[in-house]
Amino acid sequence: MSYRICNSFAGFLAFVLIMMAGTAVGQSSTPPVSPLHISDSTTDGTTWLKVVSGLNSIAWRNPGGDWRDRNLVLQGTMPWASATISNFDREQILNFDVTELVRRHKSTGSDQLPNAGWIAWLQSGTALGYFYSREYGDVLKRPKLKVTTSTGTVTLNAGADAWMALSAQTPVNNTATAMSVESGSRIALWFDLSGVSGSILSATLTLTSTTTQYGGDTGTIGIQSVDLPQTSLPGPSVPPPDTTAPSPPTAVSGVAASPTQINLTWSPSTDNVAVTSYRVFRDGALVGETALTAFNDNALAADTTYNYRVSALDKAGNISAQSSAATIRTPTAPPVPPTPGQPPIIPETALRVSDSIYSGATWLYMMGGNISVPWKHAGGDWSDAARVLQGPTPWATSTIVDKDVEQVLAFNVTDLVRQHQSALAGRIPNRGWIVKTISGPAIGQYFSRESADSNKRPILRIQTSVQTYTVSAGADAILSTSAQTPGGNAATIMTVGTNERIALWFDLSKITGTVQSATLYMTSTTTQYGGGSALLGIYPVDLTETFTPIPVRTGIGALFPRDEGIERHADILFVERFPNLDMHLRGWWWAGGDPTIQNNRSIVGDTDPQEPNYRPLAPGVKAYKMTIPAGGFGGDFGRWSLWSNLGYEPEELYIRTYARIGTAFDSMGGKFPFGFDGTYIRRNYLAIPINGFYQYLATNPATGRAWIRPDAPTYAGNGGDTSNGTNGWSARGGFIASDCESTTPCSGWTPNPLIAAGYRGLHYYSYWADQPEAKGSIFDWRIGLLGIVPKNTWFVIDSYVKLNSVNADGSGNKDGILRTWINGQLAFEKTDFRVRHWPGNPTGARNIKLDSVWLNFYHGGLLAAVSPMTVYFSNLVVAKSFIGPSGFVVP
């Protein structure tokens, strides 16, 4: 039950009667609430000299307020909670962890403290600031107390907030919308905790500053508990304060239990009363607290050195000095295959919001340009504060008003940054944030990170247990329904409205310590329109739908581990293990007469002297190395002719290979050496590279047949010879290795994070009957982003083609199929793939079939490679049914 002094004689008499009945009240099991607490009444409110003013005034014993600190010392200097304000004239959100203080107020034991209020005072530093009071018009900026208990979460508004100024000895409280904290000014607060039930799990006090700060660079504000023993309800006595800290822990040691976990132990500390817990610090940051003399630290990085120290705490909150450091290194992590059905999730360092003018985010694409990553939902994919995909609840909000003046919008993103920095399972990866309108008609323009005035660029201010960080935006892109090409780093102004959003990204990799508060600041221009105001919200990019689990298909490969004996299966047509370069003896041929092609092909074993990062598919398994040299175009032009080798051309076919992109793979784009050929290039005599020289062989040495069937259709489907359904076709692999098509570095280039992290994009480059382009269509392998693959990693490609059916009149149906799987998971599918369509000539239409398996590794286009490009293949298989992975643990 809470009582409050009023300025009437009846109120004063009631207070006296309560005090007289103190013994009975003190025996109650309800936590005590001081009958006298902070007031912001204009007649009897709290001031610098008095806890109660007016007719029944009661003076502080100490001008500026009486308190007990965290060690229960009267007027002590150890705050219950603290936060830092910086002098840079922007709104700042300060979060104070008052969990222990609220626990004491709600306690029914000997450690309880009456809830008479709190005092915010300048603990250290010289930065001074003003804070919004509970009388301020914007309710979101008023003082708040968020308490989470075992029964739920409640957010309380301040019941009183008094501005105690040395220069103002009469109450000015409930008429003040802003209050300052400085050497001669403090804020007294009181929250009614009577409705809070359950065990206290956490409690956070939030104060929002105005844009007015002055003095030095920073100032630390502490929270103390108001202590009024002369008016407190009788109750259990407060024991004499314990000010003796425990001894430091000793013999701290640890062992790496796995690549991601270190187990620590230490010898116990001693204390004059009792040690209650130990705090563990990793590299200077608090990572956990335990009552044991052991702690397991998980979610660590593999192959990384960590330094640990431990300190001891007693019941009074005294903290010992830290122990000596223990240094432990985690081992290297072994290769871990993806969870069955789960596509490999591209890490957030590689796949995030970008503002490159070549590949930045747009309304339809998270990553535009050559390696495109589409949003699942136009305008961006996100999860809201309730962890609902595309949900409405923002993680943080701020308001813009249409008044044509510059405005600084402050967003309290503390919880969101904590999520990004969390080491727990289920954390939200830091891929970027989307700023969008929640409600209201006002539309505003905002300065971007390219603004000439650095003070108006977006910044993120983070206070941790270690220090204060000011982080500039690493990317800010415009998402607009009217602009489908990236407009990121060329724009100095960005708009948020009905059809416009902003995508932001901040690099949090260097943030250490426990996050106490985080505020995003965006500055508007003087341009607003639409009328009224608008509430803007922050939502983190969430690609959960992009990485939805995909079934892993198994086939012939699963029946023959490591492909041993796979030739025995009835559906296998051909197996190429690349034992040597005499591939013509196994039915391969090469078109043209490029004299450098022999030097661009080689067989490698367990090592590649030219590539230190190379690892074989398995010990003893050879690989076929294809290289496009710098300044060159071709790396391989090999074909395995189906008619020449099998005696017929099938209507459908499966092919599979293990592939690995080398370290040298950084020039533009071109054809990837894996696909289907229906071009029917004329080859009565074929160029075969033998012993470094080209020989021309009229027949296939493996079968004695000609290289092409006598009734082959007209050549087309390659090099600009457009397909139309009456001539040839093709579906070659393709690759993207750079943001722009140039022989020099991209102009004004902001690096594409995917490319910078070593990922390369794969696709089909296809000539087909219904192609809208003159020179072939690009079909990205983007289901689950499986076709975006990292360098120096083996992966399995399976491809399948089924030719479309032909009607009696020669017209072709759109029922052909083209599919690709990566590591057994479907990465691309097209079910209307038509290559035969010849109305009036059914014989000619049916004569167009599947000519060859094509290893076409080619740079461009028309531009030569600016640097070498290398690809490795192992265990290529051709079959009548799906092959799939065969049990190799791919490094």
Image: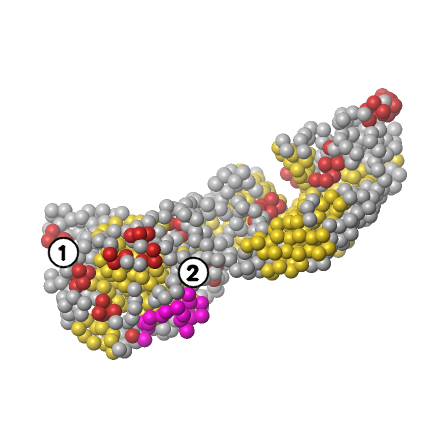
Q: Which mark is residue 691?
A: none
Disc 2 marks a residue whose amino acid type is Pro
Rendering coords of residue 22 (x, y %): 85, 25
Q: Is residue 333 above or below residue 16?
A: below
Residue depicted at x 25% and y 71%: 582
The part of the image, by quadrant, that contains residue 621 is bottom left
- Provide the residue span drawn in magenta: 599-616
Asked if residue 234 lies left or right of residue 518, the reply is right
- Residue situated in front as seen by the camera: 182 or 621: 621
**Is residue 650 within the magenta segment?**
no
Q: Is residue 854 above or below residue 71?
A: below
Instruction: Decide if residue 116 is in sight here.
Output: no
The part of the image, by quadrant, that contains residue 793 is bottom left
CA–CA distance in space, label 1 to label 2: 43 Å
Residue occupied by mark 1: 847
- Residue situated in front as seen by the camera: 696 or 325: 325
The C terminus: image quadrant: bottom left
Rendering coords of residue 756 (x, y %): 47, 62
Q: Which mark is residue 891?
A: 2
Residue depicted at x 55% and y 40%: 385
